[in-house]
């Protein structure tokens, strides 16, 4: 993505190290303009609590967690909270 080699599995593994995250999947999504962005889908434990409508607190916490462990280009631009990962 943008000239960088991305390892989605490594990003998901770092997300799962966070106390609030039970499961995570990271994918590269392409927008209408053709630009690719990383999107993280996370399943949180009950300790994460309800995050309201926008999910800003959860996204901020996960972005800070990943930012301390990974290069900036490997931090997803969006975080989507799910009740469970689809099989």
Image: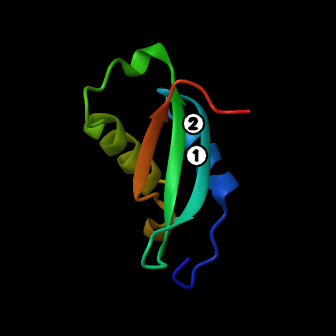
- Visible residue check, residue 8: yes
Tag shown at residue 17: 2
The structure residue drawn at horizontal position 62% and vertical position 69%, both measured from the top left corner, is 6
In the picture, measured across the screen, residue 5 lies left or right of residue 21, that is right
In the picture, measured across the screen, residue 33 lies left or right of residue 56, that is right
Q: Position of residue 12 (x, y in %)?
A: 61, 47
Tag shown at residue 61: none
Q: Position of residue 63 (x, y in %)?
A: 38, 49
| Image height of 18 relative to 30, above or below | above
The structure residue drawn at horizontal position 35% and vertical position 17%, both measured from the top left corner, is 49
In the picture, measured across the screen, residue 47 lies left or right of residue 70, that is left
Secondary structure, mark 1, is helix
- Visible residue check, residue 68: no
- Image quarter where the N terminus lies is bottom right
Tell me if mark 2 has few (under 14), some (14-19) or many (20+) residues whose alpha carbon lies within 10 angstroms of its own.
Answer: few
Q: Check contact, mark 2 vs mark 1: CB within 8 A.
A: yes
The structure residue drawn at horizontal position 62% and vertical position 45%, both measured from the top left corner, is 25
Q: Position of residue 76 (x, y in %)?
A: 46, 57
**Nearest to the observer: residue 85 or residue 65:** 85
């Amino acid at each position: 993505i943008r000239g960088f080699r991305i390892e989605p599995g490594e990003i998901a593994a770092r997300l799962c190290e966070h106390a609030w995250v039970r499961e995570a999947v990271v994918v590269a999504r392409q927008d209408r303009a053709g630009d690719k962005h990383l999107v993280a889908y996370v399943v949180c434990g009950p300790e994460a609590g309800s995050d309201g409508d926008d999910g800003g607190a959860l996204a901020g916490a996960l972005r800070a967690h990943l930012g301390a462990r990974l290069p900036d280009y490997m931090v997803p631009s969006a975080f989507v909270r799910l009740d469970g990962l689809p099989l």
